[in-house]
Every structure is written in C-alpha cells, then in structure tokens.
Image (cartoon, rainbow, N blue to C red):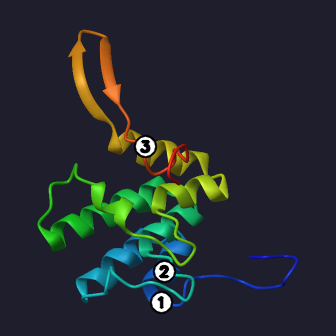
Amino acid sequence: FDREKGTVYYGEYPITFAISTFQLNLVELLCEYDADLNVCDCFGNSVFHHCVRVDSPEIFDGLMNLWNERNEKDENDISFLNEIKNKSGLSVLQYAVELGQKKIFDHILEKMKIVGWEWGDVAFYAYPITEIDTHGDN
C-alpha cells in the first residue's frame, strides 16, 4: 500500500496476489491448478520479485519448491534467479537491495553460497556477488 499515492500493488495475477497477502496455501492451491509461475506484471516483476517485495523467505522457499518440482531442478540450484530481471533490469537479489529488504536478501544470499570446505565448526563459503557488485563494467 502506497499511502502517498493511495494505491495498492498486488501484482496483477492471482498468484502474485496470494504472495502479496502471505497466503502460501493459496499459492500451492493455484499451482495445483497449473498457475503459471513465469508470469510478470506490468513492471516486469516475477513471482520471485514479489516474494522480495513482501520480504517473505517462507513464501520464497515454498515457491522455490514448486518451481523445482515443475522444472525438475535440483532444490539447491537457484542460479536461474540471476537471469530473471524486471523492467528496471533488476534481478531478484538486486531488487532486494533496491528495496532494502534485508531478511529476504540474507535468505537468498545464504541459499546461493558455495561451500568451499568445512572442518568442524570452521568453514569457507564463497558468495557469488556478481549481481550486486557494481565495480567494473557495470
């Protein structure tokens, strides 16, 4: 809800409405009836962008499970998220930065980490930050 403009933004589709109102059970029901997970609204925001907008790791995980089931993907592979850009050219992770949604940003980044090695309580992780690092050609 934008108090200054007096508008409400739910994303134009039943599935994005369900995401925007934190109704994972409705998202799952819509998917049972073949709701399209590839929809984008007039701003180019995907269902994953909407999870970022509402800062909901729980719905993000639910959508990832549904996405992976449909596309027969490994549940740990979320690299495709870097390819989904909205009309502003923002990936899902960049959108989290743009909106200042720390909870979902941390959640997505944690899922993107690559384990280099672990030894007891000590570990080395690499985080692919090409989507948020603007140094260089960007």
The disc label shown at residue 123, or none? none
Q: Nearer the viewer, residue 41 or 55?
A: 41
Q: Nearer the viewer, residue 138 or 53?
A: 138
**Amino acid type of disc 3?**
Leu
**Residue corresponding to mark 2:** 16
Residue sticking out furthest to the left: 72
**Amino acid type of disc 2?**
Thr
Q: Is residue 3 left or right of residue 34?
A: right
Which of disc 3 and disc 1 is earlier in sequence? Answer: 1
Q: Residue at x 42, y 48 (%)?
A: 108
Q: Residue at x 55, y 74 (%)?
A: 20
Question: In the image, residue 53 lies at what x, y percent?
Answer: 58, 65
- Tell whether label 2 touches label 1 (CB within 8 Å): yes
Q: CA distance from mark 1 to mark 2?
A: 5 Å
**Residue corresponding to mark 3:** 109
Which of disc 2 and disc 3 is earlier in sequence? Answer: 2
Tell me which corner region of the image, top left, top right, bottom left or bottom right, holds residue 116.
top left
> In this rendering, which labeled residue sits more in front, label 1 or label 3?
3
**Residue corresponding to mark 1:** 13
Q: CA distance from mark 3 to mark 2?
A: 22 Å
Q: Is residue 138 left or right of residue 108?
A: right
Element on which disc 2 rests:
helix
Q: Residue at x 49, y 65 (%)?
A: 51
Mark 1 residue crowding within 10 angstroms, few (<14) / some (14–19) / many (20+): some
- Decide: is 34 above or below 103: below
Q: Is residue 2 left or right of residue 106?
A: right
**Amino acid type of disc 1?**
Tyr
Q: Quadrant of the N terminus?
A: bottom right
Question: In the image, residue 37 lies at what x, y percent?
Answer: 33, 79
